[in-house]
Amino acid sequence: MRLSPLAFAGLLLIATPLITQAAPTTSTGQISVAQVVELSSRSGADPNARMTMIAYLAGVGEATGLMVGEAKQRGASVQCSRDFNLDENTALAAVAAAVPDRDKWTETPATPIIIADMFKRAGCR
C-alpha cells in the first residue's frame, strides 16, 4: 500500500503521541530501537500501536525512495539491483542484527539502521 503525502501526514499526526508513549526516544530525540521493538510487540493486540507501526514504516520506506530519486535527479549515481521493500519483520531483523545488546536499544536510533538495511537488501551501490 502506498500512502499519499497528505495521508501519511495525517497518520503521523495521529501516531506521534503513540510513538512517544512507547519506550523513550534517544537523548537526541530520534526514534529508538527500543521504541520500534516495543511498538511491534504491542501491535498485535493494540490497533493504535499497529497503525503507528505501519505509519512509521511507511514513512521510512517512502522517504528513502524519495531521497534516492532526488539524489539521482541531482546527478548522484545510485544503482540498486532490486526495488526497496520494507515490512515489520525485516525492520525488526535489521535492528536486532545491528544492535544485539538490549542495553543499547534506548540510545540507538532505529531509522538509520532500517534505511541501511533497505539499501543492502536492494543491492544498492
Image (cartoon, rainbow, N blue to C red):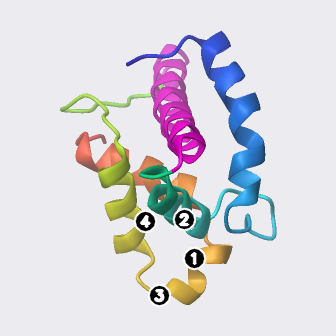
**Residue annotated with mark 2:** 38
Describe the element under mark 3 as helix, strand or loop: loop
25 w.r.t. 74: above or below? below
Q: Quadrant of residue 110?
A: bottom right
Disc 2 residue type (three-letter): Glu
Disc 4 residue type (three-letter): Val
The alpha-carbon separation of the residues under discs 1 and 4 comes to 9 Å
Is 125 positioned to the left or the right of 60 in the image? left
The alpha-carbon separation of the residues under discs 4 and 2 comes to 12 Å
33 w.r.t. 119: above or below? below
**Residue annotated with mark 1:** 105
Describe the element under mark 2 as helix, strand or loop: helix
Q: Residue furthest left?
A: 81
The circle drawn on residue 101 is: 3
Is there CB contact under 8 Å for labels 1 and 4?
yes
Q: Quadrant of residue 22?
A: bottom right
Residue at (23, 42) in percent of width and height: 123
**Residue annotated with mark 4:** 95
**Disc on the earlier residue, 2 or 1:** 2
